[in-house]
Image (spheres, rainbow, N blue to C red):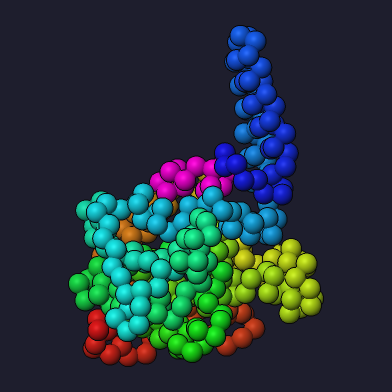
Amino acid sequence: MAAYLLPFEKPLLELRNRIEELRRFSAEQGVDSPQDVLRLEEEFAQTRRKLYANLTPWQKVMVARHPRRPYTRDYFDAIVENFNELHGDRLLSDDQSIVGGLGWMDGQRLMLIGTQKGRDTKSNLACNFGCPFPEGYRKALRLMRLAAKFSIPIVTFIDTPGAFPGIEGEERHVAEAIAVNLREMFRLPVPIISIVIGEGGSGGALGIGIANRILVLEHAYYSVISPEGCAAILWKDRAHADQAAAALKLTAPDLIELGIADDVVPEPPGGAHSDPEAAAQLVRESLRRHLADLIDLSPAQLLTQRYRKFRQIGVFKEGPVPSLTPPPIPADTAR
């Protein structure tokens, strides 16, 4: 288990300390007590399973932000072979908060794109704490258009609190960059799968999240605003973030019920940070299954399915049902 413990994991700290003390005592005294260690380890595993089976929405947000949680590059390394990263938006610079490139999985070439966080201060500054600049979204769109040109399926990994909200983003038109991505992703005639692996915050997540299938890890979240931001607006106090998290319906089961997500990817006991290799394998299995469902669909079928999926989000019985016929798609979809 990772050394970093979340507040609700405090019961696990005592058990882990007891296990370490017993092992140290056995080594110092030359006393072999494997049964006692096994008993405590089983108690630890059961306690952890119970804790993670009953997480509140706010606790799930904390898990999604765990500093030891696997990030986008970790999944790239574990899921595909021969990954070749592609850089730059061909307009301004190479935004390291969005990474992407080509890789192979089970003999299928994929275009992988995702938001990236850092592990320490230096790497977080390099990737802007996972908050993309406009050039990051333009780089993502360049790679997606390249994939469309060569009929390569696209997989996006979402893990961001949101797009960069500072003056630099406004100067370089971050809202326009996201809006163009939304429009263009509806026009790409190849399978697109988006996987929320941690935080899915606001338009910053949606900027690479228009897809035929949206998958959400068990303890990830996807929301129009962060719980803290919502609490600051509704209660004028960020201390009410736990209430906001519950009200936002941002957990994986909520997203399935609302028709936003298509599948929940299970995580290892104790969350993805407790066993990154097992987490990556579960993501790979889910990705393989959904890709198999989409790979044989025609471009017209993919576009129609993608359009209908998003047109149905937010529709309630008492409201009018929108048209589910997509608008005409221009011939230059693979620009």
In the image, the segment drawn in magenta is 269-281
In the displayed structure, 251 sits above or below 140; it is above
- The residue under the point 43% across, 43% down is 277
Q: Residue furthest front?
A: 122
Residue 87 magenta: no
Q: Position of residue 301 (x, y in %)?
A: 31, 75
In the displayed structure, 117 sits above or below 52; it is below
Q: Position of residue 33 (x, y in %)?
A: 63, 13
Q: Indicate left or right for 176 with 191 as reference.
A: right
Residue situated in front as seen by the camera: 259 or 196: 196
Q: Quadrant of the C terminus?
A: bottom left
Q: Quadrant of residue 39?
A: top right
Q: Position of residue 12 (x, y in %)?
A: 69, 37
Residue 277 magenta: yes
Q: Position of residue 193 (x, y in %)?
A: 39, 66
Q: Residue furthest left?
A: 150
Residue situated in front as seen by the camera: 287 or 314: 287
- The residue under the point 30% across, 53% down is 80
Residue 262 in sight = no
Residue 21 in sight = yes
Q: Indicate left or right for 153 with 67 as reference.
A: left
Q: Quadrant of the N terminus?
A: top right
